Image (tube, rainbow, N blue to C red):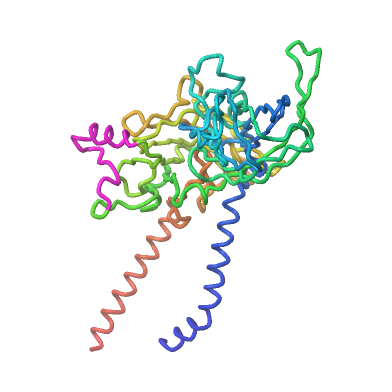
Amino acid sequence: MGFRFRSLLRVTTPTVLLFFLVSCFSFTSTEAYDALDPNGNITIKWDVITWTPDGYVATVTMFNFQQYRHIQAPGWTLGWTWAKKEVIWSMMGGQTTEQGDCSRYKGNIPHCCKKDPTVVDLLPGTPYNQQIANCCKGGVINSWGQDPANAASAFQVSVGAAGTTNKTVRLPKNFTLKAPGPGYTCGPAKIVKPTKFVTPDGRRVTQAMMTWNVTCTYSQFLAQKTPTCCVSLSSFYNDTIVPCPTCTCGCQNNLTQPGSCVDPDSPYIASVVSAKQKSNSLAPLVQCTSHMCPIRVHWHVKLNYKDYWRVKVTITNFNYRMNYSLWNLVVQHPNFDNLTQIFSFNYKPINPYQNINDTAMLYGVKFYNDFLEQAGSNGNVQSELLFRKDKSTFTFEKGWGFPRRIYFNGDNCVMPPPDAYPYLPNASLRENVSLLMLSITLFISAAFHSSCL
């Protein structure tokens, strides 16, 4: 037996290693492409509005063309590298984080002289004479699918020491976008047809002197090394509650990393959370759990009717550092083509595969539950979904009643392994009977051998 096992191991090891390497590369490439939002991206458009004696004035607009992924607080940070020795004389609706070395200028000092400027949005409440349209939201941009009216952000920049015609302008390069952390990869700037603008009265159309676009795409693999959410499951037909997999988003390790999580029963919880929040870190400060995830989504198959079945969805925030405004949940399940009613959530179908309606975006009702508070007694939202049964496909067997995948705010949540899903009572009965028969057989066999001896 040992010889056969070692021989099999020698034969299969190269194959297993090759499969592992292929899987790793496949994971990286597929994580950079969102199958549920294949055309989602952030497009940065530069419109040269007018020429100046030594350069140009441009309006830079960022459009979030993603279905369900926001840019949340503390907002976006945009960077690039100038092609020549350009400077920024002035800005409206945004500002650079550093001025750089402007010592060669006398009198009129530029806003920024850095070769690689970094720009951030201005905050709400900025004086009107420093604003332009779609600016001053603290860098927050909502997704196009959920809130198209607030899916853009803009600022105006006056560039000097630059070209003054379409032929002499050199496009910026090496664009970077943080939203607010890493995750986005930006391509090179490409010249496109000049943008046309319609006057408020609709009677005149003007156009930019020159326009170029930059496209940035998101990769969860680049954004963070560990997942940010997980899924737990339960059902009315089984008492088992399947938790999030252990250490999904990290493990409790107070020996080597004290303070890595917060004990909700600690009498000093308020002071601990307050001290951690003052650090201005983007890293989540989570409640101590077995999964250590900032967000948990629980899917409970609640009731079974003759023609319908009912599900309860609960989203719990375990992060003491983050309130989620305009949160959303993307769920893939084959019965969404027969969703009859949803309670206290909004629903929008997402059809990445044309006629296959199996994906839904769920989000809160404005001013009611569209704000998910930080960890604590109010840090959860919930709703129920009523599905109509399709007799040709409906079943509770083999975990069919549970979702295929779940995203929270655009990040893929970790599901429990399929063999851990709650099973039907008849499957449980068969398993118990099998174990009973095995036990009886072993007992009789042992008794028989004892009597023979």
Residue 401 placement (x, y as % from top left): 52, 45
Look at the image and say whether residue 159 sits in the magenta stretch: no
- Residue 281 vs residue 331: left or right? left
Residue 198 or residue 412, whichever sits in front: 198
Q: Which residues are magenta?
A: 257-279
Quarter of the image for the N terminus: give it: bottom left
The answer to which quarter of the image holds residue 158 is top right
Residue 250 placement (x, y as % from top left): 37, 51
Q: Residue at x 41, y 56 (%)?
A: 428
Residue 86 placement (x, y as % from top left): 63, 37
Q: Is residue 208 above or below residue 130?
A: below
Q: Residue at x 54, y 62 (%)?
A: 24
Q: Residue at x 34, y 35 (%)?
A: 320
Quarter of the image for the C terminus: give it: bottom left
Q: Is residue 149 above or below residue 84?
A: above
Whether residue 358 appears in this view of the structure is no
Residue 115 or residue 246, whichever sits in front: 115
- Residue 322 vs residue 30: left or right? left
- Residue 39 vs residue 256: left or right? right
